[in-house]
Image: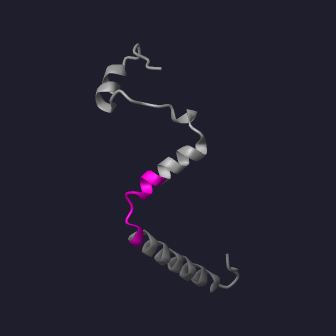
Amino acid sequence: MKKVTDSRYRWFRRVHGDTCCELDAMNPNDLRAVVHAAIVEHLDLVAWDRAAVVEAAEQASLHSFIAGYPGVGAT
């Protein structure tokens, strides 16, 4: 329902257009899938996968470094 009595109505319509929906009315799983697909569509998946490999190596190195301190167990 459009709240034409809201003082921001004309500005919102001019900036965002005439179409809107209430996201809280969507099934959360459907909303999550729509958002995921929209994001993945814009990712460079090769770079994303490479970053994940680098991150895993950095974390392994950090865990190894920390475990080398006396009295500190591997976490």
Q: Position of residue 26 (x, y in %)?
A: 56, 37
Screen quadrant of the C terminus: bottom right
Residue 43 placement: quadrant: bottom left
Pick the front one: 57 or 39: 39
Pick the front one: 8 or 33: 33
Q: Position of residue 61 (x, y in %)?
A: 54, 82
Q: Which residues are magenta?
A: 37-46
Indicate left or right for 56 with 73 as reference.
left
Check residue 65 for magenta coloring. no
Indicate left or right for 8 with 59 as reference.
left
Q: Position of residue 48 (x, y in %)?
A: 43, 69
Residue 62 sits above or below residue 11 on the image = below
Q: Residue at x 50, y 78 (%)?
A: 58
Q: How is the image coloured?
A: one colour
Check residue 43 for magenta coloring. yes
Residue 69 placement: quadrant: bottom right
Q: Residue at x 33, y 29 (%)?
A: 17
Q: Residue at x 44, y 17 (%)?
A: 3
Q: Residue at x 40, y 72 (%)?
A: 46
Residue 19 sits above or below residue 63 on the image = above
